[in-house]
Image (cartoon, grey):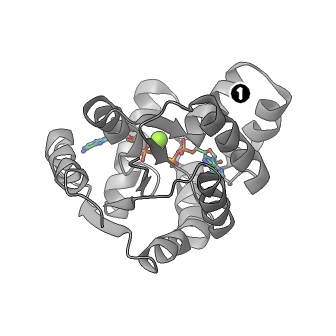
Amino acid sequence: MQNVVLFGPPGAGKGTQSALIIEKFHLIHLSTGDLLRSEIAAQSPLGIQAKSLMDAGILVPDAVVIGMIASRLEAHPEAQGFIFDGFPRTIAQAEALDELLAGYHSKISRMISLVVPEQELKQRLMLRGEALGRSDDNEETILRRIHEYQEKTLPVAGYYKASDKYFEISGVGTVEEIFGRISQLLETPTI
Ligand code: AP5
Ligand code: MG
């Protein structure tokens, strides 16, 4: 099984690249942001609770996203592997993911981190806000999301560095160029 964590700040291109990765490598895409937005669209109690936090650019509680991931893992016993997009975002989430995967005799193969300068992130998200109107793509919320990332999520990179699973690539360039860099990594077998 190839289980990959695609890591990076808001706007780094995690969702864009995940779409290409699942097609080429036959992995299942698990994006906690997408799962939360589906809950909001369905107006479920979980969605209603999450919406105000997401609109403010604040992380939702660990237990909520860990529960969502647990049920998606359970729903795909046939999977050849998963691509985790936007999860784990805290050390507690990273530890919970290891435990969940161990229950399936599996583990994370590697973390791929997309590196993009902050100015470019803001530009991409402001552009998408204008084009598609995602409710957290406004200047104030973008700044808060980046701040949450720096405070709570960046330490997760250290968690994977400690077990030699961390790989960093530039997330600047065309979508195809970046996908080429990711493919090269994923085509290299893990030890
Ligand atoms: P989430 O949905 O995960 O959002 P995010 O991480 O803030 O970032 P995005 O999804 O906006 O960016 P992305 O890296 O996927 O980039 P994309 O490909 O879209 O989370 C939203 C909220 O949910 C959080 O704030 C939090 O409240 C909550 N949440 C989610 N997961 C959670 C968790 N685990 N724990 C707690 N709370 C959680 O690209 C961005 C834009 O750039 C697009 O318009 C795209 O077309 C464009 N673009 C992509 N690649 C390029 C390129 N190479 N060049 C130019 N433009 C590009
Ligand atoms: Mg995304």
Q: Residues within 10 Å of mark 1 (few under 14, many from 20)?
A: some
Residue 176 appearing in the image: yes
Tell me what residue is drawn at x 52 percent, y 49 percent: 86
Q: Is residue 109 left or right of residue 116?
A: right
Give how far across and how far down residue 171 sits, in percent: 26, 55
Quadrant of residue 9 within the rendered picture: bottom left
Quadrant of residue 20 within the rendered picture: top left
The vertical placement of 152 against 26, above or below, is below
Tell me what residue is drawn at x 66 percent, y 60 percent: 99
Q: Is residue 125 left or right of residue 155?
A: left
**Nearer to us in this view, 103 or 149:** 103
Q: Is residue 186 left or right of residue 97?
A: left
The vertical placement of 133 against 155, above or below, is above
Q: Determine whether the beta carbon of the residue marked 1 sits less than 8 angstroms from the nearest atom of ligand 1.
A: no
Give how far across and how far down residue 89 sits, in percent: 58, 59
Give how far across and how far down residue 72 sits, in percent: 63, 35
Residue 55 appearing in the image: no
Q: Which residue is mark 1?
A: 39
The vertical placement of 55 against 75, above or below, is below
Give how far across and how far down residue 43 sits, in percent: 78, 21
Secondary structure at numbered mark 1: helix
Tell me what residue is drawn at x 73 percent, y 18 percent: 42
Q: Which kind of residue does numbered mark 1 sit on?
A: Glu
Q: Residue furthest right?
A: 45
**Nearer to us in this view, 177 or 160:** 160
Q: Residue furthest top?
A: 42
